[in-house]
Amino acid sequence: MKPTTIVACALLGSSLSFAVAAVPREGGPQQAQQMEQEESVQPVSDSWITTKVKTELMAARGVSGVEVKVETVNGQVKLSGEVDSQEQSDRAVAVARSVKGVKDVDASALTVKPGAAR
């Protein structure tokens, strides 16, 4: 080998070592912080919001998630259907508002069943 080839290989090897050392390790604090920042700026889709609100309503105590319909347009959630009481209506609105990406909740089409406790 020529001396210039040996020097070039040595320089290349040390450059690669430096490049590998500069890469953050998987799962490190820098990567976790970067991922959190990326997650917070990504917009949440309307279909994701609708699914998440419906799921939360189904899991919530004191709310009939089956009876409440959910629609989302540009982060604006509309709840409709019938519930057994005003408390259930209020709880459904609170659950919907707690979901990431929800800008506002319209519950004007959510009614209390006739003859139910108000």
Image: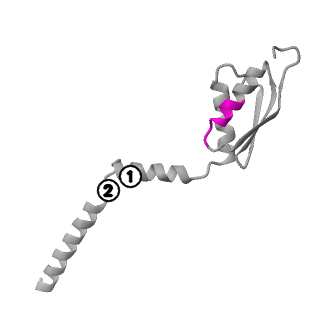
Q: Which mark is residue 31?
A: 1
Q: What kind of element bears circle 1?
A: helix
117 and 67: which is toward the camera: 117
**Residue 65, position in %: x, y?**
71, 26
Res. 2 in view: no
Q: Residues within 10 Å of mark 2 (few under 14, many from 20)?
A: few
Mark 2: which secondary structure?
loop
Q: Which residue is mark 2?
A: 24
Residue 9: where, in percent of width, then height?
A: 18, 76
Along the horizontal axis of the image, is 85 left or right of 57? right
Question: Image quadrant for the N terminus?
Answer: bottom left
The answer to whether the residues at label 2 and label 1 have Cβ atoms under 8 Å apart is: yes
Q: Quadrant of residue 71?
A: top right
In the rendered image, which quarter is residue 20 located in? bottom left
Q: Report the residue at 36% width, 52% height from top.
A: 30
Q: Residue furthest right?
A: 114
Whole-percent x and y of residue 16? 24, 68
The answer to which of 97 and 12 lies nearer the viewer is 97
Relative to 53, residue 90 above or below: above
Q: Tell me which segment is drawn in magenta.
A: 93-100
Name the side, left or right, on which 85 lies relative to 22: right
At label 2, which amino acid type do we have? Pro
Gap in angstroms between the C-alphas marked 2 and 1 = 7 Å
Given residues 13 and 102, the one toward you in this image is: 102
Which dot marks residue 107?
none
**SS majority, magenta:** helix
Residue 32 place in picture, x, y as percent: 40, 48
Mark 2 or mark 1: which comes first in sequence? Answer: 2
Residue type for callout 1: Gln
Residue at the (67%, 38%) spot, across then down: 51
Find residue 101 and report its image quarter.
top right
